Image (cartoon, rainbow, N blue to C red):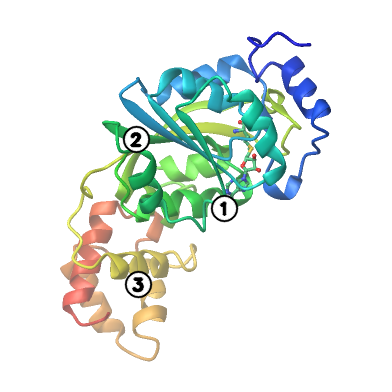
Amino acid sequence: MMSRREEVSTPRRTKELIQRHGFSFKKSLGQNFLIDQNILSKIIEAASLDKTKGALEIGPGIGALTEKLAQQAGKVTAVEIDQRLLPILEEVLEPYPHVSVVHGDVLKLDLRELFERQFTDVTGVSVVANLPYYVTTPILMKLLEEGLPLEHIVVMIQKEVAERMAAAPGGKEYGSLSIAVQYYSEPELVCVVPHTVFIPQPNVESAVIRLSVRKEPPVSVEDEAFFFDVVHASFAQRRKTIANNLKSRFFPKEGRERLQQLLTEAGIEPSRRAETLSLQEYAVLSNVLLHAGLK
Ligand code: SAM
């Protein structure tokens, strides 16, 4: 028998648990488990947890990160889609009564209801996870758009997606994802992570990113849905100017001059490209287009 105190994330204990429970990895569920203490410590540190705080983990796997969260936070709730992992989690998390495992698809769960049920006695909640890469963006957008009372979101994701989320205007990584994430949070790249810290090893590079969730957006937007509509339309074809992209969306037949006037009113040179506009400029632009009745 293995010592009870050996951490789940050691390669030896991970392999032993997987073998003893007859578990086989499902690529379609993004199952790449962490086996590196150093990276786990970096994730935990970035989440700034203590016993007054709660943590929501998405996809606990066999509990490598869950165990660490349990040692730091006052309450941990972990949502796992794969029923085959539940008996392993039950065994591994047995010493931690303040950890609950919820079986389900995080994209289908009513998170507000889950928060009200699970996090009544804590002073703040953060999401901490090594996310399944096939659904990273939908999960993060769900967390951000639902306006949940979150402090931080600290997640391991594909490096390229992390770079897009944290990108500043002007570069090729900057796009509608950067704007959406930065509207709701302040992103910060924590570290880049080599393939070797997972079993099985993923084909893509990974990174840990920390999103500090904003209480209020940093810009004044009069109609959020329309603001995101304008942002998406602006990036429809990256090689085109902002005037051409907006024309296709808002004035498909005529109205080039009117559009030029509105862009000028918003202080934006019509020959610029979408990737050069700041969050503030998109806010002003969407308010101007809204007032012009283009919604
Ligand atoms: N946290 C573990 C670790 O770091 O070793 C496992 C991380 S693994 C990258 C992703 C986990 O998310 C897997 O356990 C997978 O079954 C689970 N998962 C995949 N899709 C999910 C979904 N829609 N809702 C909840 N969990 C999901």
Q: Are marks 2 and 1 in contact (CB under 8 Å)?
A: no
Q: CA distance from mark 2 to mark 1?
A: 20 Å
Residue at horizontal 68 percent and vertical 45 percent from the top:
83
Answer with the quadrant where ligand 1 appears in the image. top right
Picture quadrant where residue 60 is located: top right
Picture quadrant where residue 20 is located: top right
Instruction: Depth check: give the residue in front, 282 or 96.
Output: 96
Residue that badge 3 annotates: 243
Q: Position of residue 150 (x, y in %)?
A: 32, 40
Residue that badge 1 annotates: 105
Q: Are marks 2 and 3 in contact (CB under 8 Å)?
A: no
Residue that badge 2 annotates: 125
Q: Position of residue 179 (x, y in %)?
A: 36, 52
User: Can see residue 29?
Assistant: yes
Q: Quadrant of the C terminus?
A: bottom left
Q: Amino acid at mark 1?
A: Asp
Q: CA distance from mark 2 to mark 3?
A: 42 Å
Q: Quadrant of the N terminus?
A: top right
The first of marks 2 and 3 along the sequence is 2
Instruction: Say which of marks 2 and 3 sits in front.
Output: 2
Above or below, 37 against 32 in this view is: above
The first of marks 3 and 1 along the sequence is 1
